[in-house]
Image (cartoon, rainbow, N blue to C red):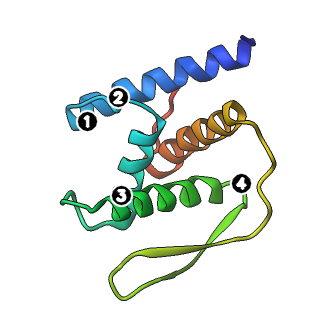
Amino acid sequence: MFKRDLALEKRWSKLLEGLKETIGKKPADLNGVLFLIGVQELGQGNRIFSKEQKQDLMHIAVCKVLSYDGFYELDYVDQDGWPHWKLIKELPHFDLLDQEKLLKIQVLEYFEKEYEIVIE
């Protein structure tokens, strides 16, 4: 494992611990964090979501965090308050591990920009 991968995992662990302190439960993985971001971005509070809505929430989160690198742009918010994103530039073709790394980096950036939290 490279030094920067270790640094990323250290920052990621700190984020998960911080979320545990904030919400009372540590997210199990990246998908759990993406779900939380999706709920936050939807802005309708914590409620019961269908399986399809949970997938949509994770999509909202992925689009939001990848918007920082210019991959997505908010297109519109529908009548039910759900944001819709459009792809601005093609995503690089990564293997699964590199995709996860990119998303973790962008999730960390999300918390740093949206909540002014420095995670080192």
- Say which mark, if any, is on residue 18: 2
- Say which mark, if any, is on residue 22: 1
- CA neighbours of label 1 inside 10 A, class few (<14), some (14 to 19), many (20+): few
> Percent position (x, y) of residue 76?
52, 83
Dot 1 and dot 2 residues touching (CB under 8 Å): yes
Amino acid beneath label 2: Gly
Tell me the distance, in whole angstroms, between the alpha carbons under discs 4 and 1.
27 Å
**For marks 2 and 4 on the same chain, the one whose residue lies earlier in the sequence:** 2
The secondary element bearing badge 1 is classed as helix
Quadrant of the snapshot with the C terminus = top right
The secondary element bearing badge 4 is classed as loop
The secondary element bearing badge 3 is classed as helix
Which corner quadrant of the image does residue 16 belong to?
top left
Residue under label 3: 54
- CA neighbours of label 3 inside 10 A, class few (<14), some (14 to 19), many (20+): some
- Say which mark, if any, is on residue 65: none
Dot 2 and dot 4 residues touching (CB under 8 Å): no
Tell me the distance, in whole angstroms, between the alpha carbons under discs 2 and 4.
24 Å
Residue under label 4: 69
In the rendered image, the vertical position of residue 102 relative to residue 52, given as above or below: above
